[in-house]
Amino acid sequence: MTYRPFSMGMKGGRSPTRRSILEAAREVFGERGYHAASIDDVTRAAGTTKGAMYWHFRDKRDLYLAAALEAADAYRRAVLEPLEGASSLPQVVGSLFELNARFYAENPKIARFYSTMTFEGQILSESRLVRHVVGIYAEYRRVVARALSRALRRPAGRLENAAASLIALCDGLFIQHAADPQGFPLEPAFKAAAEIALDGLARPGRKGGA
C-alpha cells in the first residue's frame, strides 16, 4: 500500500495567503517552539490578520499540524521521489545523502522546525501527525530498499533493514547538526557517512537484509 499525503486546514487549499501563513508558522514554531509561540506571533510574521488566520485554520494546533504535514510532504517530494530513479549502488547511496543535505541546506526554516519538533517531543504528542510520519517512513524504507534492490540485484524485502539503517544514519546526523550547527557541519558529515555506507554495502559477502 502506497502512502498518500493529506492536507489540513479548514479552507483555502493552496492559496497564497495560506502558504504565507504556513511558512511563517514554521519559522515562528521553529524559533520559539510550539508552547511559547502564539497565533499573534504567526499573524505578525505572516503580515496578515487574525481573520485570515482563522479562515484557514481552526486554532494553533490545527496550524501546527498543517505546517508539519506540509513540511513532511515537501521532504517526500525532494528526497523520496528522486531516489526512484537511482540504480547503481554509488548512485543510490550518494543520492540519499546528497538529497538530504541539499534539502536541509535549501530549506533552513523547515530544518529548524524539524529540529524543534524533535527536541520538544511534539511530534509524538499528536496522533494524526504520528500516523502521517509513520506512513512517510514506511514509504521511505520501501523506496530505499527498492533502490538497493536494483543496485545489488537482491530482493527488496531482504534489504529493508539496510534501508532503515541508512535512513537512521541520515536522521541521526541531522539531529547532531541541529543541536550544534557550527560545531557539527552537515555536508562533510553526510559525505563521510555516504563513503562508509557505500563501503559496507559493497563489501563481498554482504547480505544487506535481516
Image: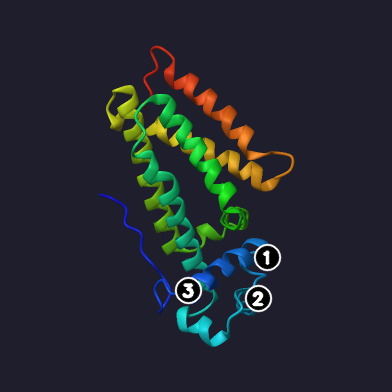
Of 128 and 111, nearer the camera is 111
Q: Looking at the image, which residue sits at the far front? A: 16
Check disc 2 and report the residue beneath it: 41
The image quarter containing residue 156 is top left
Q: Nearer the viewer, mark 1 or mark 2?
A: 2
Give left or right: position of 163 versus 21. left
Q: Identify which amino acid the numbered label 1 is placed on.
A: Arg
Q: Earlier in the sequence, mark 2 or mark 3?
A: 3
Measured Cα–Cα span from mark 1 to mark 2: 10 Å
Measured Cα–Cα span from mark 2 to mark 3: 19 Å
Residue 16, numbered circle: 3
Relative to 73, residue 9 above or below: below
Relative to 77, residue 201 above or below: above
Q: Position of residue 1 (x, y in %)?
A: 25, 49
Residue at horizontal 56%, vertical 29%?
193
Q: Earlier in the sequence, mark 1 or mark 2?
A: 1
2 and 3 marks in contact (CB < 8 Å): no
Can residue 85 be spotted in the picture? yes
Check disc 1 and report the residue beneath it: 32
